[in-house]
Image (cartoon, rainbow, N blue to C red):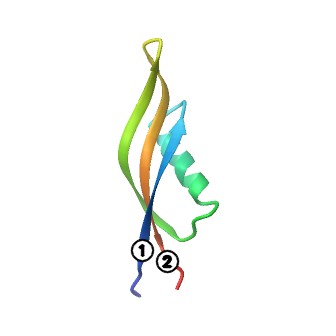
């Protein structure tokens, strides 16, 4: 196993359906410009309420990726 150096970024994913989809949306979008992604951490979960029901999810995600060598 070789040594690696990692960097982390923090982004917010959103979804009208679920927390999981908000995370997936964040990772999917990040994958278009960030290479070598290895893990994620969920830092915060928020939601919007409309007429007494959950209307929208926001999830703050920290993504770790390897730096190009």
Q: Quadrant of residue 7?
A: bottom left
Where residue 61 is drawn, which disc sits there?
none
Left or right position of 20 against 33: left
Q: CA distance from mark 2 to mark 1?
A: 6 Å
Give the residue pinned by disc 1: 6
Split into 4 quadrants, where in the image is the N terminus? bottom left
Callout 2 secondary element:
loop
So how many labels did they put on this image?
2
- What percent of the width, then of the height, locates residue 15? 54, 35
- What percent of the width, then of the height, locates residue 47? 43, 30
- What percent of the width, then of the height, locates residue 16? 54, 30
First in sequence, mark 2 or 1: give its number: 1
Give the residue pinned by disc 2: 67
Marks 1 and 2: in contact by CB < 8 Å? yes
Most extreme residue toward the top is 51
Quick one: label 1, few (<14), some, or many (20+) residues within 10 Å? few
Left or right position of 32 against 21: right
Most extreme residue toward the right is 32
Q: Quadrant of residue 30?
A: bottom right
Quick one: label 2, few (<14), some, or many (20+) residues within 10 Å? some
Q: In the image, what residue occupies the spot 49% across and 77% down?
A: 67
Q: In the image, what residue occupies the spot 44% across and 21% down?
A: 49
Q: In the image, what residue occupies the spot 47% across and 11% down?
A: 51
Callout 1 secondary element:
strand
């Amino acid at each position: 196993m070789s040594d690696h150096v990692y960097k982390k970024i923090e982004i917010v994913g959103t979804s009208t359906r679920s927390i999981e989809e908000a995370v997936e949306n964040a990772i999917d979008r990040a994958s278009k410009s960030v290479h070598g992604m290895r893990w994620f951490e969920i830092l915060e979960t928020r939601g919007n309420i409309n007429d007494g029901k959950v209307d929208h999810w926001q999830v703050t995600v920290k993504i770790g990726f390897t730096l190009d060598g």
